Image (spheres, rainbow, N blue to C red):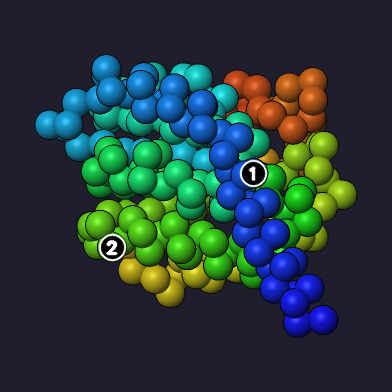
Amino acid sequence: MRLYIFLFLGLTTVTYGQDSARFTQEVAALKAKYDTIWDSNRPSIVFTGSSSVRMWHDLKQRFPEHQIVNTGFGGSQASDLLAYSNELILTYNPTKVFIYEGDNDVAAQKRPKAILSTMQEIIQKVKNRDNTTQIVLISPKPSLARWNLRRQYKKLNRKLKRFGKKEEGIYFADVWNPMLNGRKVKTDIFLEDGLHMNTKGYDIWYKVLGQHME
């Protein structure tokens, strides 16, 4: 029995490694893009995480006074960002990092406690490089497509909020509540898939995250 347990654990480790490897080309493309436009002499603010960040196409235009690096990669989970944290965060020496992960993690049935633990690993890597770097944890958003999972999302958001309150230099940005209409999610802020946001959705994010830019 003990042998089977070790074999299972080893297989799990390999599976996670192979899973993150599916982003190799996308991460390489992001690196190639910013190798040509990133100015190492200017302070950088990194936005990273899953597709809600990747698809924010006018992010730089909304914050023109800052050097914004958008390294969002669609479909990612916190474990994937951890695997590529050097390429997607640390290489840009950011003064501030906005992280959006947890949305796909909950959909993949990962427990909020485990998601928070992975987020803490990412944060620790950033802080080990420069303890003055500020980190903003963007709450997983509500959506029409995943409204049935709202209890798990709320639980994760509570954990992220508590963590942000007790850790210096860590902030929690609540986009969950502004995207609600009473007790239901707003219906006019999403694309046809009911998951990804349209301009109205990003207008909400801009108002919330703008408060954390300075």
The residue drawn where x is 46% and y is 63% is 121
- Is residue 48 rendered to the left or right of residue 140? left
Q: Is residue 135 visible?
A: yes
Mark 1 or 2, closer to the camera: 1
Q: Give the secondary structure at mark 2.
A: helix
Q: Pointer 1 and pointer 2: residues touching (CB < 8 Å)?
A: no
* Callout 1 crowding tier (Cα within 10 Å): few <14, some 14–19, many ≥20: few
Q: Quadrant of residue 111?
A: bottom right
Residue lying furthest left in this view? 41
Residue lying furthest bottom in this view? 2
Q: Which of the two labelled residues, at mark 1 and mark 2, occupies the earlier sequence position? A: 1
* Quarter of the figure with the N terminus: bottom right
> Of 32 and 163, which appears nearest the observer?
32
Identity, as a three-letter code, of the amino acid under mark 1:
Asp
Give the x, y percent position of residue 80. 55, 46
Q: Is residue 51 visible?
A: no
- Is residue 183 rendered to the left or right of residue 123? right
- Label 1 belongs to which residue? 19
The residue drawn where x is 27% and y is 17% is 36
The residue drawn where x is 24% and y is 43% is 93
* Quarter of the figure with the C terminus: top left
Q: Which mark is residue 128?
A: 2
Give the x, y percent position of residue 66. 27, 30
- Is residue 155 rendered to the left or right of residue 159? right
Cα distance in 3D space between marks 1 and 2: 26 Å
> Of 116 and 154, which appears nearest the observer?
116
The residue drawn where x is 33% and y is 68% is 168
Q: Quadrant of residue 167?
A: bottom left
> Of 30 and 136, which appears nearest the observer?
30
> Of 153 and 76, which appears nearest the observer?
76
